Amino acid sequence: MPAKVWTIFRKDLLIELRTKDSLNAMIFFGIVVLVIFNFALEAIRESIRAAVPGVLWVSFAFSGTLGLNRMFAAEKENSCLQGLLMVPVDRGIIYLGKMIAACVFMLLTEAVIFVFSLIFFNLTVWREIPYVVLVCLVGTLGFTAVGALLSAIAANTKMREVLLPLILFPVVLPILVNAVEATAIILNTVDYRQLKLPLTIMTVFTIVFATLAYLLFEYVLED
Amino acid sequence: MDQRGQARLDEFLGALLFAGMILALYMAFLQAPREKTMGDLQRIFYFHVSSGITGLTAFAVNFAASVMYLVRRNRWWDHVALSSAELGVMFLSIVLVTGPIWAKPVWFVWWTWSPRLTSSLVLWMLYVAYLLVRNYVLDPDRRALVSAVFGIVAFVDAPIVWFSIRWWRDIHPAPMLETGGLSPSMRPAFYTCWAVFQILFIYLMRRRFFLEASRQEMEWLQRRADMGS
Amino acid sequence: MIEVQGVAKYFGRFSALRDLSVTVREGEFVSLFGRNGAGKTTLLRILAGLTRPSSGDVRIHLSGPRSPQEARGGMGYLSHNTALYGDLTAVENLRFYANLFDLALDEAELEKRIQLVGLAGREKEPVRNYSRGMQQRLAIARAFLHDPSILLLDEPFTGLDQTGTEFLKDYLSRAHGRGKTCVMAIHDAVLGYELADRILVIESGGVAMDVARRSLSLAEFQQRYRALVKERSDAG
């Protein structure tokens, strides 16, 4: 079973690395969001560091949604999904492969956006980095766990690019709230023991929804 | 139960509801004691909270109907799911409107990000999203399937949302809108309102359900007519 | 063997199939004819398990009766959509499917399959660079990579040039000869007639004609088919 998840993941990764369609768009859009926030938050320029966690995760969420929108684009071309559906493989396996691919792309995007945010907002972070990586990892896993399922739902509607953000953000709110708080704790405080609760909630969220999505994915792909 | 029996039940519920509403208005505005700090404005609480609980009931019904549809694939469950989602959104809308009406005179703000109000807002958004999904998926079979999946996702998400927002408010305290307990003298009014809202929910569920079932029946009959030609 | 009993399929108000029943015997080659929108594609998709019928039952007999979803491993589906990833090479496409089907085919084997469909020398090119005909040939290799006993084909000759058509015709004849069960939707009366054991005409979601190929000549079939289509298009 893990081998098949890897096969599907590898296929998505290979296509993306060759074309870089999604990654380019995601990274560029993420940076654009940072720039917009710079103007939007001019009034609090002095204390901008406090707003950075929120800005980061809004940027991540928006660019992540862009990536999710494109998740099934390759499958729609040439009806590749049809080919996949003819293989006697559990639908949940397809879900896992695509979810992990989306997660990896989003993490790559986040890394670049984060570096740009250090430059734009003049931040110095060194010892905070491992913790930021941890929060991003858990948060992104949760985001894509739900995102992959909802992307499949939206993919077959006539308003797919518009529908996905509308149905994704309310569901994924716990991830965003906890991720912003966790990032704020890391960047702006010294007591990292407070990280336990948000990280726990995010982990629970991820496990619950990854399992749910794994089980429900076949209904969403069914015609 | 046949059609006449259904109509009689609807009539009975309607009459019960009418009487109940008059009773509830009396209890809330006249029978219940005046609250110390907020005065008569506090009476909105009876409707605000009753509506909120009824909205949650509606979403629980939606969850059950969504699961049952996936298991049984019977259109009946889809009708239940749609009706309960619409009504849930309606009841939560009442919560979101009465909240500011309550907040403005007391706290001098239209909106407070109190845990209950914030969670209600997100819950409202979740089920509006459910209705959007239904709106944009055109094929009825796929629509029933896909919205059942989303209904399950939304319901599982709700407690996690609630918990996250509660915790977030603990970290960033703000003045609470809803005061804590209910004094015993207020309980009769509250329970009356709550009961009446539940009956309202049942009544509206039945009407909405039959409306949707009729619509789909008509579609089916048109299909049969096509088949004949 | 494929058993279809009382199958109907609706899309909202529109009924694509109405109370269709047919049994395809093992090793039989069925050519499916019918106008556009008659229900051929819908029927094939239901047989493949890609969509469920609104009512009725389908049984695929492969070591016991199974639903189409369960019988996936023993069926191959080829339509005019190639199900190939344009940004991957031919070999990468096949390797992807081979892995998912648990087929122990190494690089050399996969290349051989590509050469067998007449694409020698172009194994390492992205499929996007292929012509339509070449893509369709690779799609043949992909759809039947796992050597299924049942072949479901939806207008597979679309987009093929003369050589490609000859190739596919030959491929299907040989598959038929090896005992594969084939159900093929096709527009070309000559091709469909030549390959078939049995001819089925689908019209308005139901079976309008069901004859053994032996029972009538090509000319007779063409005449009857034309008459049938004309009669229905006059009425509808």
Image: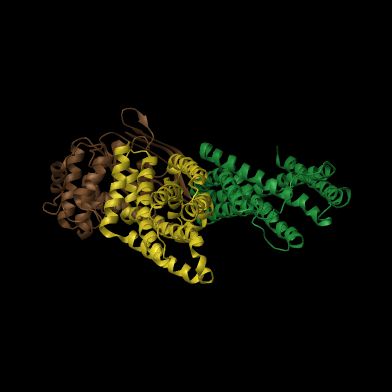
Q: Position of residue C147 (x, y in %)?
A: 22, 38
**Chain with colour brown in the figure:** C
Q: Is residue C42 visible?
A: yes
Q: Is residue A95 left or right of residue B195?
A: left
**In front here: A210 or C192?**
A210
The residue at the far left in this view is C121
Q: Quadrant of the N terminus of chain C?
A: top left
Q: Nearer the viewer, residue A152 or A171?
A: A171
B203 displayed left or right of C135: right
Q: Residue furthest front?
A: A190
Residue B137 appears at what percent x and percent y? 50, 54
Q: Residue at 19% of width from left, 48% of height from top?
A: C91
- Between residue A81 and residue B26, name the one nearer to us: B26
**In the depicted structure, whether residue C64 falls above or below residue B35:** above
| Residue A102 in the figure: left or right of residue B188 | left
The x and y percentages for residue A153 are: 46, 51
Q: Position of residue C211 (x, y in %)?
A: 31, 42
| Rendered shade, chain A | yellow
Query: Seen from this angle, which residue lies furthest right?
Result: B30
Say which quarter of the image contains residue B63. Answer: top right
Q: Residue furthest top?
A: C64
* Occupied quadrant, residue C108: top left
Task: Name the one closer to the observer, B202 or C206.
Answer: B202
Q: How is the image coloured?
A: by chain
**Is residue C208 visible in the rendered structure shown here?**
no
> Residue placed at 18% from the left, 43% from the top?
C173
Instruction: Count numbered badges in the picture.
Output: 0
Hue of chain B? green
Q: Which part of the image, by quadrant, shows the C terminus of chain C?
A: bottom left
